[in-house]
């Protein structure tokens, strides 16, 4: 996303939740230092408003794979923007330079496309919308059926607003952290047919 386009979007009131994926290639023998650096920058990000958490995707066992992916989640694009432009982050990036082959690459995702990121390729473009809709429906239907089967009698005791609040909170949490990462891997052959 272009920085000026991001500022225009925020000025127009479009401030969605975002996920940023930072890719870093670590020099051989510097992995332990890099792991320490990761813990430090994650602790620093945790102090910023709107920070929702991170994941670190480490290189595979392939000796040629030296790339780490660090996934940062923020509640609003404006809060990610504040983190990205902060002096604290700039200090941490300067500390990482001796450990890396090249400058980091950052890809920002918003909306449903964050559900369709493969752990091994989190910066790939999202698949076509119709494919995302089909896979999402295949995930939502059984989850809704299970939730209603297990919790339906208790949910029905709640007022409509509270019932809807509880149901959607459980649904979104399951979909984001449990179901969709697995569905994306399961259907990767169809979602990303040209992927090596």
Image (cartoon, helix red, strand yellow):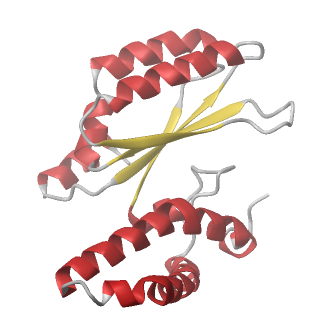
Q: How many marks?
A: 0
Residue 94, image x, y percentages = 46, 12
Residue 173, image x, y percentages = 43, 64
The answer to which of 3 and 24 lies nearer the viewer is 24
Residue 195, image x, y percentages = 74, 61
- Determine if residue 71 is in view: no
Left or right relative to 114: residue 186: right
In this rendering, the answer to whether 58 lies above or below 119 is above
Residue 7, image x, y percentages = 21, 45
In this rendering, the answer to whether 183 lies above or below 87 is below
- Determine if residue 67 is in view: yes
Residue at position x 28%, y 31% in the image: 48
From the image, which quarter does the C terminus lie in?
bottom right
The answer to which of 38 and 122 lies nearer the viewer is 38
Residue at position x 38%, y 90% in the image: 153
Q: Quadrant of residue 45?
A: top left
In this rendering, the answer to whether 107 lies above or below 136 is above
The answer to which of 11 and 69 lies nearer the viewer is 69
Residue at position x 77%, y 17% in the image: 28
Left or right relative to 29: residue 170: left
Left or right relative to 172: residue 50: left
Residue at position x 50%, y 78% in the image: 129
The answer to which of 6 and 178 lies nearer the viewer is 178
């Amino acid at each position: 996303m272009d920085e000026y386009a991001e500022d225009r979007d925020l000025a127009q009131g479009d401030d969605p939740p975002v996920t940023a994926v930072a890719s870093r290639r670590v020099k051989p023998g510097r992995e332990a230092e890099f792991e320490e650096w990761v813990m430090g920058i994650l602790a620093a990000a945790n102090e910023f408003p709107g920070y929702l958490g991170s994941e670190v995707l480490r290189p595979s066992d392939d000796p040629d794979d030296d790339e780490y992916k660090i996934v940062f989640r923020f509640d609003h694009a404006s809060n990610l923007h504040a983190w990205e432009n902060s002096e604290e982050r700039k200090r941490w990036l300067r500390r990482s330079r001796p450990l890396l082959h090249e400058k980091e690459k950052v890809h920002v995702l918003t909306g449903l496309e964050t559900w369709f990121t493969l752990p091994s390729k989190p910066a790939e473009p999202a698949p076509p919308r119709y494919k995302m809709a089909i896979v999402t429906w295949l995930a939502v239907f059984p989850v809704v059926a299970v939730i209603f089967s297990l919790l339906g009698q208790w949910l029905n005791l709640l007022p409509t607003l509270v019932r809807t609040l509880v149901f959607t909170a459980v649904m979104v949490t399951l979909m984001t952290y449990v179901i969709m990462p697995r569905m994306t891997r399961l259907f990767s052959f169809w979602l990303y047919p040209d992927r090596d």
